[in-house]
């Protein structure tokens, strides 16, 4: 089983993250110890941010019919296959439309239907040992993983997906954890954000992760676009409501010192919707097909680099 914990001893000391932040946070609802923080019925403190973040996860999932026990499993269960669809859970930025208009939970967009459909494609079209995702009666994506940046579980998953990052907010400690994850060999895909306003919100947190690494446009000959499928067309993949007027799609990325892509940035497009609506006759089949090919190239690239 491929996990990133095994890369700890092999990490290059010259690539130690420049951001040094105290790692805090833990999961509420558990009466046990995680690292230096003890949960519930102890004299140790749980940060307000941690309580808020996990509370938001419980709220989003529980009020869509998901039992608390299943929510806890989604947050805490370890890997059972070589590859899982791992989704990043984050807080909404104060300046985001989600925060202004209420509702919250931008991280959960397309969950769990995107996981369900994409993992069928991964298992059908590749030899990767992927964990299938089943949507039970509680609308919980059994087999997928929900990952916060408040503990080391993220290192178990080499591929991490973040939806609607034009709404996200990462604290200094979360940014430091994500930077460590990427420096150890993890791979992050960010998706479904549109326009310069959302780009600005994305960038505010991304600069906490990598303040000195440039974001560049992927060239047509980059390996990500050819590792399995040759994806020379730069067609914008629309959301359920179509393309946003006046937007141009961009495939961008952040690279490490050796030229490996660490962060794949899908800007002005919505692959998550294309996966989510794979079975819906009104969504263009050609766009779902293209989104599957991009996703599988992302998976193969992340598992081989």
Image (cartoon, rainbow, N blue to C red):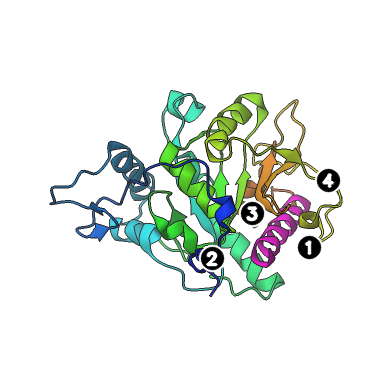
Q: Could you say which quadrant of the image residue 113 lies in?
A: bottom right
Badge number at residue 275: 3
Q: Are marks 3 and 4 in contact (CB under 8 Å)?
A: no
Residue that numbered label 4 is attached to: 219
Residue 11: horizontal and vertical position, in percent? 56, 61
Q: Nearer the viewer, mark 3 or mark 1?
A: 1
SS assignment at label 3: helix
From the image, state whether disc 3 or disc 4 is nearer to you. 4
Left or right relative to 295: residue 165: left
Would you name the residue on which mark 2 appears? 7
Q: CA distance from mark 3 to mark 1?
A: 20 Å
Going 71% across and 41% down the picture, which residue do you hit? 238
Which residue does the numbered mark 1 point to in the structure image? Answer: 227
Residue at image point 73% right, 60% down: 297
Return the residue nearer the eye: 303 or 162.
303
Quick one: label 4 or label 2, which is nearer the N terminus? 2
* Residue placed furthest toward the front: 14
Label 3 neighbour load within 10 Å: few <14, some 14-19, many 20+: many
* Measured Cα–Cα span from mark 4 to mark 1: 14 Å
């Amino acid at each position: 089983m491929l996990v990133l914990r095994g890369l700890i001893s092999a990490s290059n000391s010259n690539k130690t993250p420049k951001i040094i932040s105290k790692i805090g946070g833990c999961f509420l609802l558990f009466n046990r110890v995680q690292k230096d923080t003890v949960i519930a019925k102890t004299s140790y403190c749980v940060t307000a941010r941690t309580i808020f973040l996990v509370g938001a996860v419980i709220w989003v999932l529980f009020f869509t019919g998901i039992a608390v026990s299943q929510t806890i499993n989604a947050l805490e269960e370890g890997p059972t296959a070589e590859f899982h669809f791992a989704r990043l859970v984050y807080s909404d930025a104060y300046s985001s439309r989600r925060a202004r208009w209420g509702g919250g939970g931008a991280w959960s967009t397309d969950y769990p239907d995107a996981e369900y459909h994409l993992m069928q494609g991964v298992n059908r079209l590749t030899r990767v040992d992927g964990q299938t995702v089943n949507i039970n009666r509680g609308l919980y994506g059994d087999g997928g993983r929900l990952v916060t940046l408040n503990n080391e579980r993220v290192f178990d998953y080499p591929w991490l997906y973040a939806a609607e990052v034009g709404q996200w907010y990462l604290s200094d400690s979360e940014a430091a954890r994500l930077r460590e994850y990427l420096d150890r060999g993890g791979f992050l895909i960010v998706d479904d954000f549109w326009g310069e306003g959302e780009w600005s919100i994305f960038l505010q947190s991304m600069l906490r992760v990598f303040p000195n690494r440039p974001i560049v446009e992927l060239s047509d000959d980059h390996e990500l676009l050819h590792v399995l499928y040759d994806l020379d067309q730069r067609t914008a993949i629309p959301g359920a409501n179509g393309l946003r007027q006046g937007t141009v799609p961009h495939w961008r990325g952040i690279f490490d010192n050796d030229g490996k892509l660490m962060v794949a940035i899908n800007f002005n497009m919505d692959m998550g919707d294309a996966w989510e609506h794979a079975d819906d006759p009104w969504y263009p089949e050609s766009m779902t097909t293209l989104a599957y090919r991009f996703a599988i190239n992302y998976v193969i690239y992340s598992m081989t680099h």
